[in-house]
Amino acid sequence: MAKKTSNPIQSLKIPRVIILSCKICAFISTKLVTKYAARLFTTPIKHKVPKRELEMDRKSIQHTIHIPKINKDIVVYEFGKSDRKILLVHGWSGRGTQLFKIADELLHNGYSTISFDAPAHGKSKGKTTIMSDFIESILEIDKNYGPFEIAIGHSLGGMSVLNAIKDGLKVNKAVVIGSGDIVQEILDDFISKLELKPKISQLLREYFENKYQTVMDNYSAYRASAKIKVPVLVIHDNDDPEVPVKAGIHIHKHLENGSLFLTDKLGHRKILRNKIVIKKILDFIKSN
């Protein structure tokens, strides 16, 4: 849905045709535009795997597993052979090889990694998904491939890791990079980018709460963080155009045993390949 940009601190742009279609729906009826916005919000883009990720894709052992609680299948990547396992969780419109640079360094340091294409992402089937699908995938992968020493999540994957730990995932430590935080603020930002009236954001939240019979704010990262006891490293870029740095700062504030590492000029995705960031992750993992 969003256009690519080569500038790491420039936000992805939503095509004008989608914005125009939203305005047409809004003109027809509030209910229609709410349903249309919900469809857009839950539909990730399946990007072509970049060349830089092909080696991890090629060297991984790949399996398709079923996630009973959501009745969906996902593709899982086993990268390296070691009993010291680390779980990697990509973000929205990402894929299981997106954290390849981190995975490479972990392999060189004696770890193996398990990652996956979340439902409707990468090689996994489907067109729509939500965060609870990510969380259930993590918990099922833990049953099949765990235990994991560490869990590392990027963006929505970071939120999902924190929620999975809250829901029973056992790890010694966790790392979240560019994680979103408050669900309502995420919805507000999405509706703003669609150039719709702010009231649609509240209607969108109510739509999801009615559909899934849940309270959306229960998935906010800061709420999960308040219940986590294990050490968590929060990494965020001051210039992140997709997820404001205040999200990382707020998450860290609610952690009992948290560390905060802020970077500059790396944006939302380039941060995953930065040598200083990866060294910080390794130092955190190895520390007592």
Image (spheres, rainbow, N blue to C red):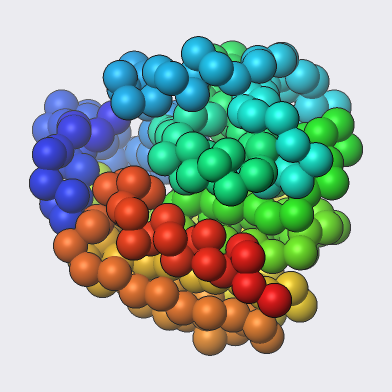
Residue 177 image-quadrant placement: bottom left
Of residues 99 and 180, the one drawn nearer to the viewer in this rendering: 99
Closer to the camera in the image, 97 or 104: 104
Examine the rendered structure and indicate whether residue 103 appears above or below residue 81.
Answer: below
**Residue 179 percent coordinates (x, y):** 46, 60
Q: Residue at x 85, y 31 (%)?
A: 144
Say which residue appears at 67% left-offset and 38% top-offset: 112
Position of 230 with respect to 104 (left or right) is right
Q: Quadrant of the C terminus?
A: bottom right
Classify the position of the N terminus by image quarter.
Answer: top left
Residue 41 pos. (x, y %): 43, 39
Instruction: Indicate left or right for 63 with 115 as reference.
Output: right
Q: Nearer the viewer, residue 77 or 15?
A: 77
Q: Is residue 45 visible?
A: yes
Q: How many marks?
A: 0
In this image, 101 relative to 133: left or right?
left
- Residue 181 visible in the current orientation: no
Q: Is residue 262 above or below residue 175?
A: below
Q: Residue 45's image quarter?
A: top left
The residue lying at 68 percent from left, 69 percent from top is: 224
Q: Is residue 74 above or below residue 194?
A: above
Front-lying residue, 26 or 173: 173
Image spot of residue 135 (x, y percent): 70, 45
Q: Position of residue 119 (x, y in %)?
A: 60, 26
Q: Which residue is the extreme one toward the right?
A: 143
Q: What residue is rendered at 16% in x and 55% in y?
A: 9
On the image, which quarter does residue 247 sit in?
bottom left
